[in-house]
Image: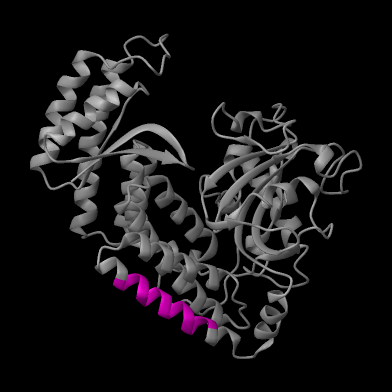
Amino acid sequence: MADGDNDGIPESVLGILKTASEEILSKQDGYCFTVDNGPNEVVDEPFSYNDAELAEFINFDMIGDEGDNLESFNHLITNTNHEDLTGDRKVLKILLNSGIGQVVPENYVVLIHYIAYISNLQEPFDVTYLQGRRPKRFTLGSGELIPGLEIGIKTMTTGENARFIIQPELAYRELGCPPRIPPNATILFDVHLVSFLSPESIITFDRENRDPDAFNKNMVQVKKLHFEGNEQFKLKNIDKAVFKYNRALELLHIAGCKSDNEEIEMMKYLNKIYTNLSVCYLKQCAFNKVCRMGIEALKYSERFSKRSAKLFFNWGKALRLLKDFTEAKKKLDMALKHEPQNETILYEIHKLKKDKEFHRNVESITLKDDNDADENKRMAPEFWDVFNKHLTEFYTGSDDVLTVMLNKNPDDIEVVKNKASAYDLQVQVITKAGVPTNCIAIKK
């Protein structure tokens, strides 16, 4: 990167990125990753990470001003968003995205991706996404993982994304792990459990992966699952489509790439499947999962995902429905950048403006008393005047879903259900990592 060409990234953050990138790349035994930064669609030329691209792996929630007391990551914890896994707050879990199936059994082999942070250093000290794109493999019960992380992983299911905040006693204790991890450091891991295997099946797994044609055989299964998922989606069997796509994702994540061509093939299908899942989750009004699909796609298949108008469109629509209008506009602008004449994207931007105006009207009513933070308070009569007008416009319009932010008073939720039922509309409370929010979706 040339001096002064910082792509809008502050100098303080560039310093963090430089330290992190040097640390990560120093562990790669001479293997350097590349990325296509050109404007054309050629994807088989060499590429390299720069500081701005590495920034995608830095969770800026972790970064505070120098001297902030972030030792325990307290700013990430609320009363309702975490689970105390040990009973003494030595391992806290924040579920980011639920998985499927059973939790990991004792002594199984796990395949995981993670980003690991030390709060007081304000940077990740380990990022598996930059290390060959294959998940790291650990055997539970063997001492390969720090105790707190093993406790956390044992609560996970396949495909789950979770955040674990681990106190020093169950991490690197008073010794640390010089030079990267200081003594008595609180550690945070963002973990994606790709898959897990029994001690018996890992032998077969290893043997199959030694097959020189393993990648092609794996891709045959991936393409089959992708096709089956598409067919289920056409039949409106969304749950079955999601299952097929997630199974394909699992196979793709554990695939080993032995050449640039194989990596390109893997990335291409990862992008397709993450995009298809984002459409499915939109249909299910699982808007936070749509956003998660966008985040995961950029981690695993950035060469394709960063140019995917459809992925950014779905992401932007989900953010609009979650009332995050600023981020929604950014994602829709990205989609429009790749397809400037796309009428669907342009109409979604128009809906964003209208939805933002409606939300402002609601806020002007509900936030009249800034000192009143009672989430159980009933909505004011003026709110229902605005809501009734918007509900009628929604019923007669072409939109397929309307969202509204309420307080958590159950009586108001019942009022919304009654008003929606008069139009034969469905009502769904939006959840985030399985926890109900105060965002209500109304569907045709």
Q: For the point 60% across and 83% down, which residue is it?
A: 259
Vertical position of residue 298 compared to residue 43: above or below: above
Can residue 9 be spotted in the picture?
Answer: no
Give coordinates of residue 33: x percent, y percent: 63, 69
The front one of 29 and 378 is 378
Q: Is residue 432 left or right of residue 364?
A: right
The number of discs equals 0
Q: Is residue 273 left or right of residue 2?
A: left
Q: Is residue 126 left or right of residue 213?
A: right
Vertical position of residue 24 compared to residue 199: above or below: above
Can residue 68 be spotted in the picture?
Answer: yes
Q: For the point 43% across and 50% down, which residue is it?
A: 289
Question: The magenta stretch spans which residues?
Answer: 218-231
Question: Per the image, is 225 magenta?
Answer: yes
User: Residue 218: which quarter of the image?
Assistant: bottom right
Give coordinates of residue 73: x percent, y percent: 67, 33
Q: For the point 72% across and 27% down, which residue is it?
A: 67
- Quarter of the image where the N terminus is located: bottom right
Q: Mainly helix, strand or loop, the magenta region?
A: helix
Give coordinates of residue 42: x percent, y percent: 44, 77
Q: For the point 60% across and 72% down, which residue is it?
A: 254
Question: Per the image, is 195 magenta?
Answer: no
